[in-house]
Image (cartoon, rainbow, N blue to C red):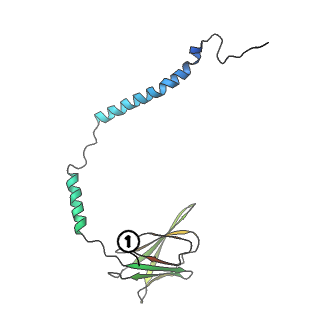
Amino acid sequence: MNTQRLSFPADATPLESGRRWLWLLFGGPAIVVVASLFTAWIAAHTSDGVVDESYYQHGLMINRKLAASPPPAMPQGATIAADARGVVVTIVDAPAPARALTLVVVEPHAAGTRRTEIALAPQPDGRWMSPTPLGDAGRKVLTLVSDAWQFPVTTVDGPVGTQRLGPAGRKL
């Protein structure tokens, strides 16, 4: 005997069994229409207000001040030499002697980031030194910062060895 199983009760019509899909089909776009009408009502009945009435003139004034002020004096370059004994930094053509110099070393790892600030001590010969070794493995992001200037960030893969730094756009 050949019997067929129906996916809907025998007394229900195909229209009644598809009614729940009809609600889903038309309900989604209907919710979007209601939400967009609510958003339009919020936009029409609230005001952000202008932060500054003369924002354009203020921007022009800022640009004039920036053009009139000279850029900060930067050294022509620096050399960082790192080994197991520590770090030695030599500044090239500094416009003014730095009072403090810090080498910021950021080491990104899978488990997080380690940031180390190494204070460098001035030496009589003009170099700056620290007995803190930088280690060999991994990527390091180096930034040389003084009390008056900061060199652009330098990224090093592996041992630091000897790195030459300079302001952006200048070759040493």
Which of 79/129 is in front? Answer: 79
- At x 33% / y 34%, what residue is drawn? 42
Image mark count: 1
Q: Which residue is mark 1?
A: 169
Query: Measured from the top left, where is residue 150 in percent x and y?
Result: 38, 72
Left/right of residue 53 with respect to residue 125 in the rendered view? left
Left/right of residue 51 with respect to residue 28 in the rendered view? left
Left/right of residue 130 with respect to residue 58 in the rendered view? right
State which quadrant residue 144 falls in: bottom left
Placement of 27 over or under 100, stated as above or below: above
Placement of 111 over or under 70, stated as above or below: above
Placement of 143 over or under 87, stated as above or below: above
- At x 55% / y 22%, what residue is drawn? 21
| Quadrant location of the C terminus in the rendered image | bottom left
State which quadrant residue 34 falls in: top left
Callout 1, which amino acid? Answer: Gly
Which of 39/15 is in front? Answer: 15
